[in-house]
Image (cartoon, rainbow, N blue to C red):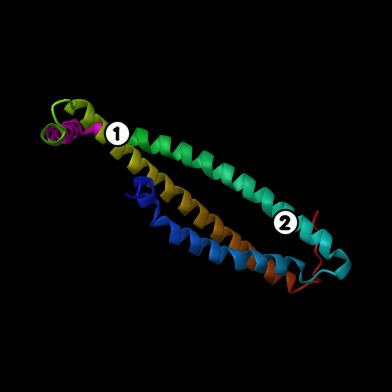
Amino acid sequence: MIPVYVINSLPRQPAIFLQGLCIGPVILAAGNAVTSNTPVADVNDISTTYFFVRQLGNTFGVTAATVLFNRRMTLHSSRLLDVSNRLDATTRSTLAQYADLIHRNGGGASNPALGALQLFQNNVLTQSRLFSYIDIYFGLAALGVVALISIAVTQIRSKTGPRHFLPW
């Protein structure tokens, strides 16, 4: 018998593999782009600086995304609970349907009211996680667009003058 956690993680494994497969060439290409115009004597310094800044950005980016995810999840769960309080009749109807389902299928030792509340809380958590991920990915997409625009603007300016790379 296969454990439940193995079954739940199966759909994510191909996506993580494809993500790693795509990120590998991008990291190599970025490293080559950074060191392509440097003199041979400065390649070690430039590549060390590049990998240090990349690792620093990775550390701060993961931390910032985690904090942002936590704050957005708190915001969305409070807003979802606020909406459910305003729609009190719909919330009570949903809790009654959950309780009826648990009463029919839960057995004699089950507590339908508590189980209904736990199912409702699980739905609120799932929705708030989904909204938080959507917020973070929209923010990262906007940051990517800003980065692409800034790269395009600097490329236009750099074609008019000499190209020098100064890491400081």
**Residue 11 appears left or right of 94:** right
- Location of residue 163 in the rendering, given as x and y in whole percent from the top left corner: 79, 70
Q: Choose top left, top right, bottom left or bottom right for residue 94.
A: top left
Where are the magenta residues, as a range? 83-100
Residue placed farthest to the front in the image?
1
| Residue at numbered disc 2 | 51
Which residue is more in the foreground, 160 or 141?
141
**Residue 70 appears left or right of 7:** right
Q: Are marks 1 and 2 in contact (CB under 8 Å)?
A: no
Q: Is residue 106 magenta?
A: no
Residue 121's label in the rendered image is 1
Q: Amino acid at mark 1?
A: Gln
**Residue 19 appears left or right of 98:** right
Which residue is more in the foreground, 108 or 83?
108
Q: Choose top left, top right, bottom left or bottom right for residue 81.
A: top left
Nearest to N terminus: mark 1 or mark 2 = 2
- Location of residue 19 in the rendering, given as x and y in whole percent from the top left corner: 51, 61
Q: Residue at 57% of width from left, 43% of height from top?
A: 64
Q: Amino acid at mark 2?
A: Phe
At mark 1, the secondary structure is: helix
Q: Residue at 68% of width from left, 70% of height from top?
A: 155
Q: Is residue 153 visible?
A: no
- Location of residue 26 in the rendering, given as x and y in whole percent from the top left corner: 61, 66
